[in-house]
Image (cartoon, grey):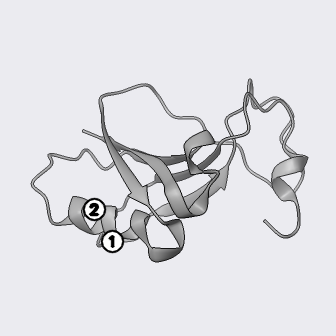
Amino acid sequence: MSLGLLEKIPNKLDSAIYCLYTDYEKDHTKPYTTLIGCRVAHLGSVPEGMIGKSFPAGNYLKRIAKGNLLQGIVFDEWTKIWQSDIPRAYTTDFEVYGEKARDPENAAVDIWLSV
């Protein structure tokens, strides 16, 4: 973030920041890949040193973390998810830090779970 890498991403569709969880070895207790980036129109021009990732449409369950980002609301929501009986697919899950997350003390972050 401090290096301004998000500003270097071409073809962005909006200003939201996405945190993507993918390439699960099994479930959330085993290795998986985490990527931070932006939604783009196409992956035709990925800057050197960055990667582009697409994933197919699927069935998703939406959860929302609300409150103060600095007090760990996203982690707290993930803890609830991990302790739940949601029938997760463990393909690709993602968080969206959009307009509702701009005020860190009164934020809402969408969490999309593949099911």
- Contact flag, marks 2 and 1 (Cβ < 8 Å): yes
> For the image shown, how many numbered marks are present on the structure?
2
Taking the image as shown, residue 115 lies to the left or right of residue 32, namely left
| Label 2 to label 1: alpha-carbon separation | 6 Å
Q: Residue at x 66, y 41 (%)?
A: 16
Taking the image as shown, residue 9 lies to the left or right of residue 66, namely right
> Is 81 placed above or below 55 here?
below
- Who is closer to the viewer here, 87 or 73? 73
Mark 1 residue crowding within 10 angstroms, few (<14) / some (14–19) / many (20+): few
Q: Is mark 2 on a helix, strand or loop?
A: loop
Q: Where is residue 26 in the image (x, y as percent from the top left)?
A: 28, 61
To which quarter of the image does residue 75 belong?
Answer: bottom left
- Who is closer to the viewer here, 105 or 1? 105
Q: Position of residue 56 (x, y in %)?
A: 46, 28
Find residue 22 and name its label.
none
Find residue 27 and name its label.
2
Question: Quick one: quadrant of the N terminus?
Answer: bottom right
Q: Which residue is drawn at 55% across and 43% down?
A: 100
Amino acid type of disc 2? Asp
Taking the image as shown, residue 11 lies to the left or right of residue 107, namely right
Question: Quick one: quadrant of the C terminus?
Answer: top left
> Where is mark 1, residue-wise?
30
Q: Where is residue 88 in the image (x, y as percent from the top left)?
A: 22, 47
Mark 2 residue crowding within 10 angstroms, few (<14) / some (14–19) / many (20+): some
